[in-house]
Amino acid sequence: MFQVMKMASEAQNLTILHPRPSSIVAALYTLRDLGADVVILHGPSGCCFKHARLLEEDGVRVLTTALDEAGFVFGGQKPLTQLLKKAQEMFHPRLMAISGTCSSMIIGEDLHQAVVDAGLDIPVLEVEVHAGYRDNTRGVIITLEAARDKGIIDEAEFQRQKTLLEKATEVERLYGAASSEYLAPERGDLKYEAASRLLELIRQGKRGLNILNAKKETAYMFADVTAAVSEVAGSQVDTMANIDDRLGLPKVRRDAQNIARDLSARNVDYKLIGGLDEYPVAGEAVSRLAAGGHYDFAVISGVPHALPMSALQGMEIFSITNGPRQVRPLRDLGHQHVVVELDLHPKTMGVTELVESEFGATLRALAKAKS
């Protein structure tokens, strides 16, 4: 407890030395979740290259105005207007968006005027964003503000999303990758060793919690861990999942529907603890559902550090994350076993069904070998 309080105190005045997620990237993913068919990055061709290409796996056309040295001096208003027109001719989108970049914001480009000059007959979201914010969630909020102003979402959903983002930021500052000045990446426990220990507890007749608390599309793989634990442990575990398909932006709801479908096909019974965007507040539902029960262990897949330790008192905790820089904070919180699913995010882009996880595959193989 002292260590947790110390981490919370230190987090208030930290200088972060390791790279953090970009607000521009956060804006791009939010535009995808809102249903944008085409997104134009108004900046250099290399800006957010990796994530821009990944988003095309999800069906979003990501284009760039490819600002160069001349553009930095003389501006890129005309190329942006031309690209807006060309994008409509090429892809016939229902919803288009422009995302600012550090370059375009520094030189003061007017995104709105470019949209006016293009004269398109479809809605275009103008996202005035750069990567200079401390918290990447700021890029999400700016995008949602643009969507609200265009009538894509209503005020109630905007306020709901903003509250969740503020909570997510708080979780990362206190217990996540923003909780320390520098966190070295770690690979976590060997999956074989963690799975062997979990299987040992199950064979001993111990009871456990099997919790899916994942963020957006990453749940396609984390849910495979949840399914594997349910398959091996059966009635010895109570399963919970944040896949309420009534909540969230359009793509988030579709992902929740797909995951719920696949879990049901595998005969996994679970209780809902919120939507895929409610991972930072799912701890409240977990605490309520776990109260009064006796559990010896907990398997938490997705964002384990968002769950309060008070809900996991006395349990041996197995945490499955996709963040190499999340290993140390989880160990400091008291999670005994921390497993990292490397390269999870690229593997869950553009999919519509569960993706096999290394930990899930290891657990199934061990259970079969020892049966």
Image (cartoon, grey):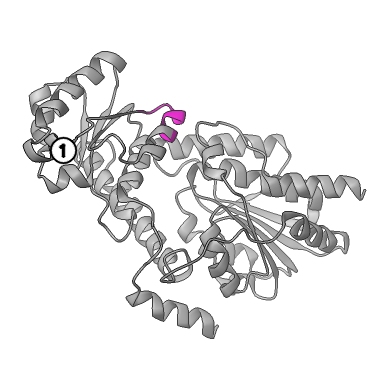
Residue 190 percent across, percent down from the top left: 72, 58
**Badge 1 element:** helix
Q: In this rendering, would 282 be left or right of 269?
A: left
- Residue 102 part of the magenta segment: no
Nearest the viewer among 24 and 181 is: 181
Q: What's the residue at 22%, 38% (across, down)? A: 43
- Whether residue 57 appears in magenta in the rendering, the answer is yes
x 72%, y 37%: residue: 266
In the rendered image, the vertical position of residue 113 relative to residue 13, given as above or below: above
Residue 142's place in the image compared with 73, above or below, is below
Quarter assignment of residue 1? bottom right
**Which region of the structure is painted magenta?**
54-61
Residue situated furthest front in the rendering: 69
Is residue 128 visible from the viewing direction of this image? no
> In the shown orientation, is residue 34 left or right of residue 283?
left
Left/right of residue 108 with respect to residue 322 in the rendered view: left
Q: Is residue 254 visible?
A: yes
**x then y, percent, for residue 15:** 34, 71
**Which residue is the site of mark 1?**
69
Instruction: Give the residue type that dot 1 points to.
Output: Glu
